Image (cartoon, helix red, strand yellow):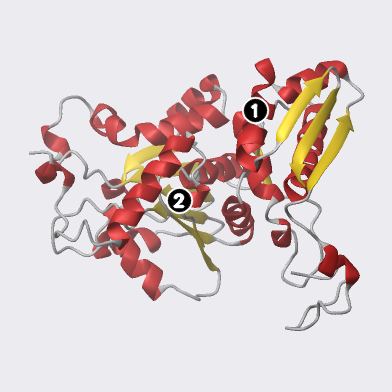
Amino acid sequence: MKNPSGGGFGPDSGRNIPWLATHDDTAEAEITLSFDDNRLASRLFGQYDQNLAFLEKRLGIRATARGNLVNLVGPADPCEQGKVVLENLYARLKSGHDVNLGDVDGAIRMSTSQGSLFEADGAPRLGHEEIVTRKRTVRARTPAQDGYIRALKRHELVFGIGPAGTGKTWLAVAQAVALLDKGMVDRLILTRPAVEAGERLGFLPGDMKEKVDPYLRPIYDALYDLMDAPRVERGMQSGMIEIAPLAFMRGRTLTNAVVILDEAQNTTSMQMKMFLTRLGENSRMIITGDPTQVDLPPGMKSGLSEALDLLDNVEGIAQSYFTEDDVVRHELVGRIVKAYEAATRAGEHAAPHQPRRMREA
């Protein structure tokens, strides 16, 4: 905790500081906000005031809208936080962007992490990180996402590690599309190890694209979210966008490209080494995965886990970690991830890991 005057506190430093001695987090406060545009205020509050209802639930306050006014009642600190959230979201609307429940959730999360708004040298930053593409602007919704986007912008090789739903793959694709839009790279290459089905690709029907499409569908979804469909199709036909299984990377040198490896926990040690050594001039690599969700055969070490250990503190490489608190899908997903994490810590899943296809048998 910091003194408003900027000084730090020692064990007894609160004795002669009246503001600290009299502060009461439980004291009820009331804040009334007025917005100058009724139309934007209506969009800020959401259909049937759903955004305000979400704010009430998350912060434990009461938010009542009347025309272009909103009244916040509750403990002082949450009310002040609600004020900051609504003002930031209103500014977002005034700049021409939409606001949905996900944006409200992100604004609440980010309002609790003001300490992350400083550079390493202590200088303040103007705001949370964002990625700008032709189709949309993507903003960090959690402190972990904020740090991840900063790492993507500053390092040539970035690991994004954490559970499903934290946005690590989607943000990686967004950064790749942004670099492509700016002409900083010529190609976007996306790959995954195709191990989930437990079948060799050669035994699946169709041509190469039809064989691997089911494995790579999540990457397609991210691309179509961030680029117009005709541009995606043209890019895939011209080779500007390439989506392929990891096996097709062997023997290549990838220059002037952004290369994303998704589901990297399912790589073997040899596959990961092969992939990392494909990096060519003016290229960037982004590797995402969840080491707790390995689908390799029993006894086989994940190439991702090994690479994280070997490449820790190597210059030019960043490792960004997410937790269940960073899940930005449906809030039930966050609860589900927390339940599994708690069970794992309690030893309820102590049985040796088996491939998913064996567990389902």
User: Residue 97 at what x, y percent from top left?
Assistant: 74, 28
Mark 1 residue element: helix
**342 or 324, which is in the foreground?**
342
Q: Quadrant of residue 99?
A: top right
Quadrant holding the N terminus? bottom right
Q: Residue at x 78, y 58 (%)?
A: 24
User: Residue 32 at what x, y percent from top left?
Assistant: 87, 33
Q: Is residue 286 left or right of residue 192?
A: right
Residue at mark 1: 53
Which of the numbered marks, if any, corresponds to residue 332?
none
Q: Is residue 42 above or below residue 187?
A: above
Mark 2 residue element: helix
User: Residue 217 at what x, y percent from top left?
Assistant: 36, 31
Q: Residue at x 62, y 44 (%)?
A: 141
Q: Is residue 311 left or right of residue 266?
A: right
Q: Residue at x 44, y 29 (%)?
A: 221
Q: Quadrant of residue 348?
A: bottom left
Q: Is residue 36 left or right of residue 190?
A: right
Instruction: Give the Cα separation between the discs numbered 2 and 1.
Output: 23 Å
Kindly identify the amino acid type of the residue bearing the numbered disc 1.
Ala
- Circles 2 and 1, Cβ within 8 Å, touching? The answer is no
Numbered circles on residues, count = 2
Residue at mark 2: 324
Examine the rendering and report whether any part of residue 193 can be seen.
yes
* Mark 1 crowdedness (10 Å alpha carbons): few <14, some 14-19, many ≥20: some
Examine the rendering and report whether any part of residue 103 can be seen.
no
* Mark 2 crowdedness (10 Å alpha carbons): few <14, some 14-19, many ≥20: many
Kindly identify the amino acid type of the residue bearing the numbered disc 2.
Glu
